[in-house]
Image (cartoon, helix red, strand yellow):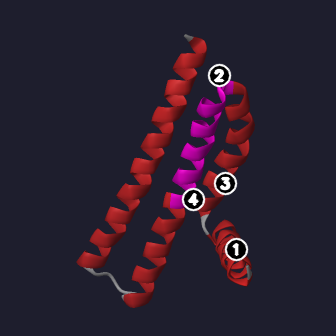
Amino acid sequence: MNALVLAFLNSWRGLRHGARTERAVRQELVLLALGIPVALFLGATLWVRVALMVSLLLMLAAEFLNTAVEKLCDHVHPGHHPMIGTVKDLASAGTFMAQMAALLVWVAALVERLG
């Protein structure tokens, strides 16, 4: 049980740090905060509501992973390096794919609701 508490505290510290220091994380936290009540209204069924909320959570998770990769790259090689740039671009592409997946889920839910 102690290990679970410590793991939660580590995650909480990471969440707080990301919210304090990263603009993209703050923006996606705002989207999550606004998106949850909208998801509860927009979703026609429980599973659609869950999909809407999970898509936002996965988008935020991808943003945290992207931020971690960028910070690690900057620590390992602070100067400009083409391979580090490629690594950062790949992590950014992962974030973009998560955003597109979330957009797809939200558009599908909206079409279902209006249709």
Residue 92 among magenta residues: no
CB contact under 8 Å: marks 2 and 4: no
Rendered image quadrant of residue 44: top right
Q: Judge the density around disc 3: few (<14), some (14-19), many (≥20) Cα neighbours within 10 Å.
A: some
Give the magenta part as a residue range. 42-61
Q: Judge the density around disc 4: few (<14), some (14-19), many (≥20) Cα neighbours within 10 Å.
A: some
Q: Decide which of tag 2 and tag 4 comes sooner along the chain.
A: 4
Q: Decide which of tag 1 and tag 2 comes sooner along the chain.
A: 1
Q: Decide which of tag 4 and tag 1 comes sooner along the chain.
A: 1
| Main SS category, magenta section | helix
Task: Measure how far apart labels 2 and 4 are at the Cα level.
Answer: 30 Å
**Where is residue 31 drawn, in percent x and y?**
65, 46
Say which residue label 4 marks: 24
Amino acid of disc 2: Ala
Say which residue label 2 marks: 44
Depth check: 58 or 80 in front?
58
**Where is residue 80 drawn, in percent x and y?**
32, 81
Amino acid of disc 1: Phe
> Element under label 2?
loop
Task: Measure how far apart labels 1 and 2 are at the Cα level.
Answer: 33 Å
**Where is residue 93 drawn, in percent x and y?**
36, 56
Query: What is the number of the mark on residue 29?
Result: 3
